[in-house]
Amino acid sequence: MESKTMQPTPVQTERENLRRVRFTRPALWVQLVLLACLIAGPLVVPSFRAMDVMTKVMIFAVVAASYDLILGYTGILSLAHVTFFGIGAYSMALVVFHSGQAAWYHIPVAMALAVGISGILAVALAFFSLRVKAIFFTMMSLALAEFVFILGDQWHDLTMGEDGVSFSLPGIFSVNWSDGTFLGAALNGRLMTYYFILVASVLLFIGLVRFVRSPVGRVLKSVRDNEQRSTALGYKTFHYKVLSNVFGSVVASLAGVLFAMWLGYVNPTSVLGIPVMLNVLLMVIIGGMGTLYGSIMGAAFIQVAEAWLPDLQKLAMLLLPGVEMAQRLAERWILYFGILFILVVIFFPKGIVGTARDVIARRKLRLAQRDHQTGL
Amino acid sequence: MAEPILSLAKVHTYIEQHHILQGVDLSFMPGRATVLLGRNGAGKSTTLRTVMGLTPASSGEITLKGRAVQAMKPYEVAKLGVGFVPEDQAVLYTLSVEENFRLAMLSESETTWARMETIFQLFPDMKKFWRSKAGVLSGGQKQMLAIARAFVNDHDLLLIDEPSKGLAPIVVDHLIESINHIKNHTTVILVEQNFYMASHIGVDYFILDDGRTVHQGLMADLVHDDGLKQKYLGIA
Amino acid sequence: MTTQTATAGLQEQGGTDFKKVGVWIASVGIWFLPLLWIDPTTYAVLTVAGLAMGMLIFLTASGLTLIFGLMDVLNLAHGAFFVWGAYVGFSLLNALQQVGWVEGAGAAQSIGSVLLCLLAALVVGGLMGIVLEKMLVRLTYGSHLKQILITMGASLILVEILKVVWSPNDEVVMVPAAFQGSWDIMDVIITKFRVVAIVVGLVVLGGIQLVMMRTKLGIIVRAGVENKEVVETLGYNIRRVFTGVFCAGAALAAVGGTMWSIFKEQIHPAMGEENLIFALIVVIIGGMGSVTGSFLGAIMVGLAFNYVAYTLPPLALGANIMIMAVILLIRPTGLMGKE
Amino acid sequence: MASQAPVVQTKDLTIRFGGNVAVNAVNLTVEPFTLKAIIGPNGAGKTTLFNLLSGQYKPTSGSIMFKGREIAGLDAADRTRLGVGRSFQLTNIFPSLSVLENVRLALQSKARVGMVFWRNYRSYSELEDRAYELLRQVLMDKRWAVEAKTLTHGEQRKLEIAILLALDPELLLLDEPTAGMSLEEVPAILELIQQIKAGRNRTIMLVEHKFDMIMTVSDSIAVLKEGRLICDDSPQAVACNSEVLEAYLGGGVKNG
């Protein structure tokens, strides 16, 4: 008894160690540097194209991370994730569009709408298809995605069909608003929107990280490992799957609101299309499934590639001016995308962050073994 | 002395991370029925499944009629003349009894169909339910079908995994009778927990424990060796 | 005692059969409901169109469901086989037009050209299936996630190659002369090619059933759906059966694509993806792994699509999703799916 | 008195799989704080009976009372919450989680914070400390940080018992806790079971094949054969029962 109070257990020691390095661990510094870059970016590099790519990376990092919660942490393959993203984007666009004049309260209303609609839809989808084999969920979600796409494309009275919806943002987020310069950069609606999106996506990302590190996150991990065992511990695994699915979908729809705010325009192909879904899927896989932070890497990779790939195409055409087939091949960038997809799944299944973690873990193990041997 | 028809040397098998067979050494003489004994989880079924290539051996050698088979696929082993009766009455429920038999026939020749006559004599129920789905058969009948199915081909070696599991005593007696009939034509290797059945079929026996061969001998001797039975089989 | 249990089993089956009859009557009856708001002549036209559409969807769905039932593979590249079949047929029709077999051709030449197209699609689809199975799908057995990702990637590649070989734009398909136009039976206008589609669908259904029920190959495939291990230990190379079924499924999808292209008289690269959605709905409704189930599902989807599309066009696909949801609520494994 | 009510009482408990009656009209009573062993030949329905008690299966007919409450309609998770803990015949742990985390998850379930998604799971330090304490009890504290799949078979079974203790169940269902263990590892498990029993605050039901082990630890032994309960008596009485011996030696003793 006395020894217990005298000597902390190894578990307590480890916890104390972690607490002590809370503010000095390297991961925190990486995060802070990244955040600083995002904050200073538009002020240092006053290029609209750079700001555009950065914003899209932030938004898609959130979408991919919320997808990772469902795919990587819960082990459910949904093909309707971008549908929720699109619902958020359309909520924002349509609220402003149908009220004629943009007002500040449209943003919270759009967010509430996005959360409400996607929450209900996610619960319904989960309820219909999560009870049976996981593969049903995939097929149902694909059907749902296609259906919502067709609604967006054809319900002309509501969504303006494939022409899409243009709208302007209220107040300081409006493209027309400007107020001199700040630290040398033009202080305008674009910049304000950028910072709004920055704050919002950082908050959403933190929300996802917290979710994964909460007791619920641990249960999800256990369900993936051995579902029967989780049930025998008293966890209603179905409820957990539904909860994580709904949480991920709601976050994606909020990211959709941000995306619409940034573009000021939505159409079915840009926010509801299957290619967007594949993009997000690829981001998660490149970054590493079940790592959350991988989503940032994945989103950055894809967005940067998408932004500068057209230049490469032009270069290819310049280099091979006469070859018609080469030009046609160069135009089809989805082809390379598909090849990349297969190569990543076969040869790089753990993604960037997953592979990096493996390497670090193996090195730690080797060091520990060496210490052990020299200790003897 | 004759060459063994099947022998296993230092065979190790893993199922996922579990080390199930930890160096099994066995050899089976042609024409002699052998029983593999041992308690639950000793590795008896896995031994048969490893021979068939269903749970491939990670190391060791398996020799069947002088050929190394440890790297072969199940269908290749089957084509070498090995019949396998898996546990749990593994017949195809959605197929009719007839189709179950046709599936088992490696060639649907005259001689194969002639063989069916003998099977019908041994298992009259098979004729009776010829056109019924195998799923409606009783447990005993399914087990009969699973064994009879292995009998349609001219196998040199028949591996039977726990045929008595979950069957009523009277059915077990019928099974013993029919396996003893098969024994005259084919080398039989039987995994069995039911000692009564094991002792009425086996000539030789091996006892496995913790994935290793721990004892072997003549069945006739084991029947009277209460100490050994108590130690490895938990029965006295 | 043994006979007792056997008869009990039979009686049990008899009981479910009786219940089944009731469900059957009810589910057939539902299809007459649209008569409440659609006039009988239009209803008849829509029904023929729906049956034809259902038959064509069935061509894609039957392969999908067999591949899933036997190999436990969800093949999202199935739509790519379909669209390749459509383009191969389109090109062959263009070529045949040069020798005058298509427009302004006689009945024999028309039938011949369609048969040639179907044969070409069959060969191309089958070859693509074999290559895909051996190169990629083989790597993914046992992991649904990998299957879906890899087959989706393969689908992207195949469709992009198609856009390079042909063009990314819509194309108009020529219809052989004998199949142009329609018959008028008591004011009911029946497009000729719809009848052809129904006939082809029935022939394929009959062919599949014949192979599955009457041949050794069919026994092996059905046994494989139920228990792969037993089939392997009986001396059959299940992997080769897998390749064969994948090849046959791909060929059927390609045939479906050719038929669809003549049926719709136009093609575009995204049509494979669109048809895949229908096929997936059909497979879910019918129960994964059941050919008969997917036939029933395809008919339901084809009919519902046409009835609803006539009344409220944008909701047609939604109606099918509703049917799927309702069926999943009642029977989570689909109409004929295994428990 | 309420405390004297049996912990488990089944009435005509039956389950059918197709035509096969796996558990057939079993009436079984388990008194508080005793250890009841269930024995019987393969296929007798022992594991199926456990699956019925713990909620993996729903009975075809019959009732299951747990401390005077009907539980036949509840699912496995609900029964765990009421105090039915279950170990499995095949080792059943979370292979890629750490040993400590395996136990902590059980404690988290018991503490009813499993649905919390806004707090860090490590902020519940009392759960971690308690998990470590339980590992110490089953002599596994040295291995707390490794992944559970790297444990030996015997260690995994010990971990499973720690998980079970973490659920703090009033009724422990142990399904062949020594199955697949090497002979050297068995005494440690046996001692652990003795220790739990000596605590006099839990009821144990045990499926086991090792006859000598059962004779030393159990207060009563129930014998199943072909789904029926053929005997339920003290160890001494069961050992002399001729029907039991017949059941154990296989179906054919009377003919042979």
Image: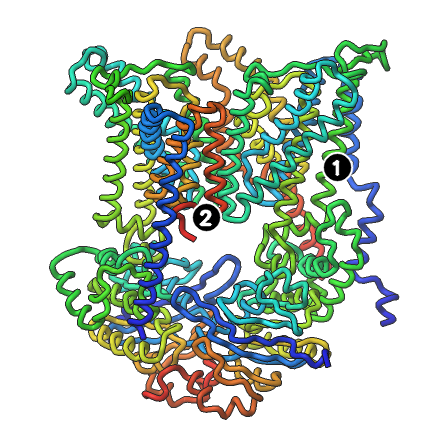
- Say left or right for B92 vs D218: left
Q: Nearer the viewer, residue D12 or B38?
A: D12
**Residue at point 66%, 47% (across, down):** A361
- Dot 2: chain letter: C
Q: Position of residue A93 (x, y in %)?
A: 67, 20
Q: Position of residue A333 (x, y in %)?
A: 50, 20
**Residue at point 75%, 20% (across, down):** A194
Q: Secondary structure at mark 1?
A: helix
* Residue B209 seen in the figure: yes
Q: Secondary structure at mark 2?
A: loop
Vertical arrangement, residue B193 with respect to residue A133, above or below: below
The residue tagged 1 is: A206
Tell me the kind of residue under disc 1.
Ile
Q: Position of residue B150 (x, y in %)?
A: 26, 64
- Dot 1: chain letter: A
Tell me the kind of residue under disc 2.
Arg
Can marks 1 and 2 be said to lie on one chain? no
Q: Position of residue A61 (x, y in %)?
A: 67, 30
* Residue D150 seen in the figure: no
**Residue at point 37%, 14% (across, down):** C171
Residue furthest to the left: B110
Residue C44 sits in which quadrant?
top left
Quadrant for the N terminus of chain B, please. bottom left
Q: Nearer the viewer, residue D99 or C241?
A: C241
Disc on res. C331: 2
Vertical arrangement, residue A121 with respect to residue A43, above or below: below
Vertical arrangement, residue A63 with respect to residue B7, above or below: above
Vertical arrangement, residue A302 with respect to residue D44, above or below: above
Residue furthest to the top: A322
Colouring scheme applied when the structure was drawn? rainbow
Quadrant for the C terminus of chain B, please. bottom left
How far apart, in angstroms, are the residues tagged by discs 1 and 2? 40 Å
